[in-house]
Image (tube, helix red, strand yellow):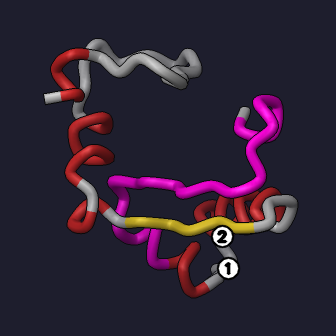
Amino acid sequence: MAKEYGYHSLVVEGDCLALIQKLQHQVIDDNVLGFIVSDILHIAKTFSFISFIKREGNKLAHDLAHWLPLSSEDRLWVNDVPNHILS
């Protein structure tokens, strides 16, 4: 989605510490999580800059991860941010 909007630099904020650590250190295990990490790292190579940040360093990622209602739909905020996240 970031590529579709023309972004070349990206900061990925995550709430899953194990996944973020594997992405930061480019650890690809031989299991289902390894396949996901491999796909993410493959896509990451298309950006000129990408950084993966864990929850402890980012309250916004934590709040977004716990935001209800849960949905499988994509969510993207470019100019406006939900009020409860903004505070």
Return the x and y of residue 60 as percentages of the image width and height: 27, 44
Three-letter code for the amino acid on which mark 2 is drawn: Gly
| Residue hosting label 2 | 34
Q: Which residues are magenta?
A: 2-21
**Relative vertical location of residue 21 with respect to residue 42 in this rendering, above or below:** below
**Relative vertical location of residue 7 with respect to residue 13 in this rendering, above or below:** above
Return the x and y of residue 39 as percentages of the image width and height: 77, 59
Distance of mark 2 from mark 1, alpha carbons?
A: 5 Å
**Side of 21 where 83 appears, left or right:** left
Q: Quadrant of the N terminus?
A: top right
In the image, 34 versus 5, the foreground residue is 5
**Relative vertical location of residue 81 with respect to residue 32 in this rendering, above or below:** above
The residue positioned 16% from the left and 21% from the top of the image is 84
| Residue hosting label 1 | 28
In the image, 67 versus 50, the foreground residue is 50
In the image, 52 versus 82, the foreground residue is 82
Q: Secondary structure at mark 2?
A: helix
Pointer 2 local density, CA inside 10 Å: few below 14, some 14–19, many at least 20: some
Return the x and y of residue 57 as percentages of the image width and height: 25, 67
Query: Residue 47 is drawn in which quadrant?
Result: bottom right
Q: Secondary structure at mark 1?
A: loop
Q: Is residue 5 magenta?
A: yes
Which mark sits nearer the N-terminus, 2 or 1?
1
Pointer 1 local density, CA inside 10 Å: few below 14, some 14–19, many at least 20: some
In the image, 61 versus 69, the foreground residue is 61
The residue positioned 41% from the left and 54% from the top of the image is 14
Query: Residue 18 is drawn in which quadrant?
Result: bottom left
The residue positioned 56% from the left and 68% from the top of the image is 51
The residue positioned 29% from the left and 17% from the top of the image is 82
Three-letter code for the amino acid on which mark 1 is drawn: Ile
